[in-house]
Amino acid sequence: MKKFLAHDTGKERSVIAPLLGRIYLWGGVLTAVCFCITLIWGFDVRQLFGFGIGYGFMCLQFRYFGYCCENAVTMDRKGAVRSMRVCYAVRMAAMVILSCGAAYTGFVNFTGILIPQLFPKIILTADHFIGRKG
């Protein structure tokens, strides 16, 4: 079985690792660009924290998603479906808790948390049109 990024010993390489690397890199670039665009309205440290937390959460949730996908391919159909449903529920529940916590406390701008969550889809679509694989 192929190992995931965190368990990579150097001998076994994750199938998803190159894709996650591109998502992390370009997600960081897009997050920085969006934060710079918000500077038009003035600097606010809550916006900076929001984009930082949003980018970190995006990276963590796609790392977890990649781990679940790699494990699901080794399971039978029923186990894989259950695993992926649990993965989706955990990711969405964490997103709701993080966003609501930011919105209710006001310590962090919650739009800064939400915007980076859109970037993986944009990156994967761009990879498809460019023709990059794995």
Image (spheres, rainbow, N blue to C red):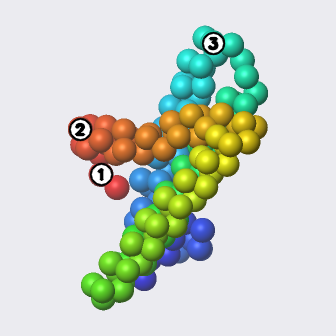
Q: Quadrant of residue 134?
A: bottom left
CA–CA distance between discs 2 and 1? Answer: 10 Å
Q: Quadrant of residue 36?
A: top right
Residue neighbourhood size for the residue with mark 2, other residues' Cα within 10 Å, grouped as few (<14), some (14–19), many (≥20): few
**Vertical relation: 99 (above or below) 43:** below
The mark found on residue 133 in the picture is: 1
Q: Amino acid at mark 1?
A: Lys
**Vertical relation: 125 (above or below) 79:** above
Give the residue pinned by disc 2: 129
Query: Of callouts 3 and 1, which one flags the residue occurring earlier in the amino acid sequence?
Result: 3
Q: Are marks 3 and 2 in contact (CB under 8 Å)?
A: no
Is 55 placed left or right of 127 in the picture?
A: right
Can residue 12 be seen here? The reply is no
Residue at (63%, 12%) from the top-left corner? 41
Residue 31 locus on image (x, y percent): 55, 33
Can residue 41 be seen here? The reply is yes
Q: Nearer the viewer, mark 2 or mark 1?
A: 2
The mark found on residue 41 in the picture is: 3
CA–CA distance between discs 3 and 2? Answer: 34 Å
Q: Secondary structure beneath disc 3?
A: helix
Residue at (61%, 55%) from the top-left corner? 97
Is 133 placed left or right of 96 in the picture?
A: left
Residue 93 locus on image (x, y percent): 53, 61
Residue 30 locus on image (x, y percent): 50, 31
